[in-house]
Image: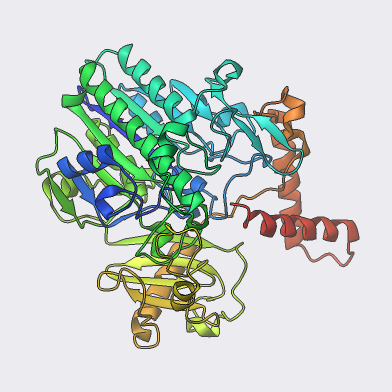
Amino acid sequence: MPLFVVETRSFQTTQPLSASQGYHDVGYHGSDIETPTLDRLAAEGVKLENYYIQPICTPSRSQLLTGRYQIHTGLQHSIIRPRQPNCLPLDQVTLPQKLQEAGYSTHMVGKWHLGFYRKECLPTRRGFDTFLGSLTGNVDYYTYDNCDGPGVCGFDLHEGESVAWGLSGQYSTMLYAQRVSHILASHSPRQPLFLYVAFQAVHTPLQSPREYLYRYRTMGNVARRKYAAMVTCMDEAVRNITWALKRYGFYNNSVIIFSSDNGGQTFSGGSNWPLRGRKGTYWEGGVRGLGFVHSPLLKRKRRTSRALVHITDWYPTLVGLAGGTASATDGLDGYDVWPAISEGRASPRTEILHNIDPLYNHARHGSLEGGFGIWNTAVQAAIRVGEWKLLTGDPGYGDWIPPQTLAAFPGSWWNLERMASARQAVWLFNISADPYEREDLAGQRPDVVRALLARLVDYNRTAIPVRYPAENPRAHPDFNGGAWGPWASDEEEEEEEEEEGRARSFSRGRRKKKCKICKLRSFFRKLNSRLMSHRI
């Protein structure tokens, strides 16, 4: 989850981000997990109950820090793998860079997961004054080891641009909360401050200090028990950060934004009930986020907001609060939603492009004809316009999964809630009236389907090519002293871009000669992309 503290002029901003926390996994949504701090902060602030994120890690983080949809950053497909020569595009001006322009001190603590193959990709080169955390997607909470396949393992805890070997052994959730307190203790509350706290919790591996696990000893499902303990530990970390804000004089001028980064992984203890789907899918369970804003600066507190908000909106919202400017020339997809959150006004946002992923496995039953001749419904895409939500292609695992509190999952529930048809490639829901996506209206409202397909076409015209390169063996931690870190030089990057350019030029030409080696190289590159798309 992210935790933000934003400060405008004399105003601090903190944004905590929790990883893979399910929609159901917070007390105020009726969970069996104890989250007293999150419940209190949300109750005293504004709960965002029409808030959307992305279904997996990298896309959410990229949209948060750039204010742009994935189709405008080339990150439409899957996540950034540790061995890929890929990162958040270097030509994008990030949120912390904009806040630095407005006079802010900017700090990041936690999970980066936006690429690191070159030093220019590191958090400290993308707008953060300081950084403590991991560069990859999932590490051991104590040892900070991460394996990206058999025998491809390395250490991943960094302070600034150096490997933090000496901090190994401390549970990451507690370590990150302690670092935030240290930053606050050493910073003047009279100077603007931006904190981006991206907790590793509650992403796998499922690990928790024993004292938190003991609280849930009667919970039958072992994965759920460990997951619950991790959530409660993270909740206490947020409590400690909030206490530090008060102790060191930041709280009265602070804005705390809490957000999950994707839906819960139901087979690793998470729960999105009663929403459909899970992490990695475009059903509501994958993209409906946990979110709230807590701040003494809110004009209307202690309420629930139904305003449509997307994770891209934090960029212009925070820049605006900080006294900066985010003009139309910046090409943002986000909106300034502070008046909607603070004052209860209507949201300026009326639609959300969840994504268009041309590399994801095409749906067997989709076709251009099925899309009225204007859109190939085999392509994975999802969009919401007003109260309508359209999905095409393969949206991902589409079951409804009740909370798994029992040791064994009841088969009767499983069969009852199975996805109705596997022969579809188009779904339409009135998401306001049917947030659980149980009544598909695609057959009844072809006019709405056609209109939303046309919007997908409009968006697709603005999309840039997907960047999902093959893995590079030079990224192996053994070549970097046993730790994950940058491996590519500027010269190698230029050679790679030239090679890709030659490949594109060759594919456009009409040469008669065929190169068997080139064809094999292309085949394995495509195969690699398909395999990686499932390794989330």
Regarding residue 400, the answer to whether it shows in the image is: yes
Identify the image quadrant of residue 276. bottom left
Q: How is the image coloured?
A: rainbow
Task: Answer above or below: position of 318 versus 352.
Answer: above
Task: Identify the image quadrant of residue 230.
Answer: top left
Q: Could you say where residue 409 lies in the image, as x and y percent from the top left?
A: 49, 65
Most extreme residue toward the front, as rendered?
218
**Apparent side of residue 13 relative to residue 389 in the rendered image (left or right):** left
Quadrant occupied by the N terminus: top left
Where is 147 relative to 423, above or below?
above
Numbered label tally? 0
Horizontal and vertical percent for residue 286?
43, 59
Q: Which residue is drawn at 74% across and 37% down?
A: 152
**What residue is drawn where x is 41% and y is 20%?**
179
Nearest the eye: 64 or 21: 21
- Depth order, front residue of 51/69: 51
Is any atom of residue 65 visible in this view?
no
